[in-house]
Image (tube, rainbow, N blue to C red):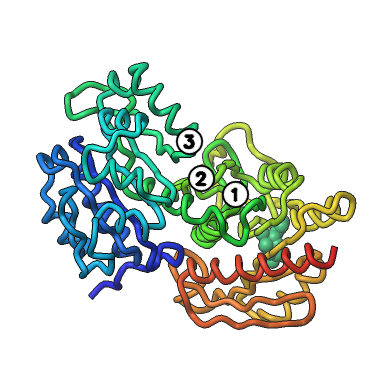
Amino acid sequence: MTMAPEKITLLENKRILLGVTGSIAAYKTVDLASKLNQAGALVDVIMTEAAQQFVTPLAFQSVTGRAVYTDLWQPASAGNGLPTHIAHVGLGEGADLLVIAPATAHTLAKLAQGLADNLLTVTALAARCPLMIAPAMDGGMYMHPATQANLQTLQGRGVLLVEPEEGRFASGLVGKGRLPETPTLIGHVRRALGGTGRLAGRRVVVTAGGTAEALDPVRYITNRSSGKQGYALAQAALDAGATVTLITSAQHLPAPTGAHIVPVDSARSLRDAVLHAVQGADVLLMAAAVADFRPAQVAEQKIKKQDNDTGITLELTRNPDILLDVKAQRTTDGWPRVVVGFAAESENLLANARDKLQRKGLDLMVANDISAADAGFSVDTNRVTVLDVQGGQQPLELMSKTRVSELIIERVAALLTDQTETS
Ligand code: C5P
């Protein structure tokens, strides 16, 4: 048996109204509704008549376990916990977010004009929650000045736009107008719901992945870091409302929606990116596994073996300690306000971690026992202890890297609040 999908704390028990209009991309939003439901959200779907030509209400009802609304004159079902009087008012009132995906050119035009001719457009007028639209249509329709003007009008009113992607349409034509895939749509939903979180208005820099130190044009020395903990931290910071810069060597992982990605490879490129990004930043979460040494020389050409070679000797030289450089910079300009380090150790975990906390001038150190198979590199779970400057020690049980990240973000938010109150 496989594990049930993990709930997303930010989405749990959030009431999301999903408006589906008549584009072929409607089939994709059955998956969106399903994934939102699995993440813990309460998803109420409103379909236009045209949407029902592509997908049936039953498909949405099956994945959300909730009644689907199609008719302006249909009373809301008591089963959804909504008032049973006029559906559009009840639906709009209780919602945390109204997402229209896919949004056709026609529905966009109606929304821009404030027309109210079906349950969805009436609900959009009645709702007091934020409105997010994800247009999906043929490239020509999307780029038409009428559609673009309607989008501008809507954005001017604060409507959140999920830009369509470039690609191939059902018609065979290529252009801009494709509905993004579910993970991207969920990323935008998270952004919309997290905007008022504890890190709203804060700038957070996260590093992720292991560094790669070149030997020659073909080979490099690296380590087992997968980047998963760093990406989970970036997502948790985004969910808390922060502006996030993710400096990463793990570019194969899906980028969290809304993060500014800075690709790096070697420790030195990571250091340059970090020292630049932390200027004016509130927080640095240094989850990257930085190589302490690199080859002293990088061969210009591929290193060749000779028939009589029995081995070669590599000379390594020290890499800069990035956190020490950050510490020095921080003493002159005060940024970042909070610095969190990560210590992966195979022995004397807590003593080594505390020593690094002090030496590197950190506010928190996350100590990670890599000797256990279910914690540390590559896996989705971790078992860590969070150390602080006061000598505090918070051991966390085995949990997902997502949950570890949320708890670290809570500690960071508390430190920032303390600083604001005492300054
Ligand atoms: O000293 P150690 O490598 O064990 O410390 C781990 C912490 O220091 C991590 O947060 C890592 O990202 C950071 N580090 C660094 N520069 C290095 C090595 C590690 O900033 N050269």
The crowding category of the residue bearing disc 1, from other C-alpha atoms within 10 Å (few below 14, some 14 to 19, many at least 20), is: many
Nearest the viewer among 353 and 319 is 353
In the rendered image, the vertical position of residue 384 relative to residue 89, given as above or below: below
Residue type at mark 3 is Arg
- Give the mark, 3 or 2, whose residue is nearer the N terminus: 3
Q: Residue 65 got which mark?
A: none
Residue type at mark 1 is Val
Q: Residue 244 got which mark?
A: 1
Front disc: 1 or 3: 3
Residue type at mark 2 is Gly
**Can residue 225 be seen?**
no
Please count the marks in the image.
Answer: 3
In terms of image quadrants, where is residue 366?
Answer: bottom right
Quadrant for the C terminus in the image = bottom right
Quarter of the rendered structure image containing ligand 1: bottom right
For residue 147, side relative to residue 292 (left or right): left
| Mark 2, residue position | 258
Q: Are marks 3 and 2 in contact (CB under 8 Å)?
A: no
Mark 2 C-beta to ligand 1 under 8 Å? no
Nearest the viewer among 318 and 321 is 321
Label 2: element kind: loop
The picture places residue 72, in percent across and down from the top left corner, at 19, 48
The crowding category of the residue bearing disc 3, from other C-alpha atoms within 10 Å (few below 14, some 14 to 19, many at least 20), is: few
For residue 8, side relative to residue 49 (left or right): right
Q: How far apart are marks 1 and 3 (CA)?
A: 25 Å
**Can residue 394 be seen?**
yes
Q: Distance between the residues labelled 3 and 2?
A: 21 Å
The picture places residue 142, in percent across and down from the top left corner, at 32, 24
Q: Residue at x 86, y 54 (%)?
A: 328
Q: Do the residues labelled 2 and 1 touch (CB within 8 Å)?
A: yes
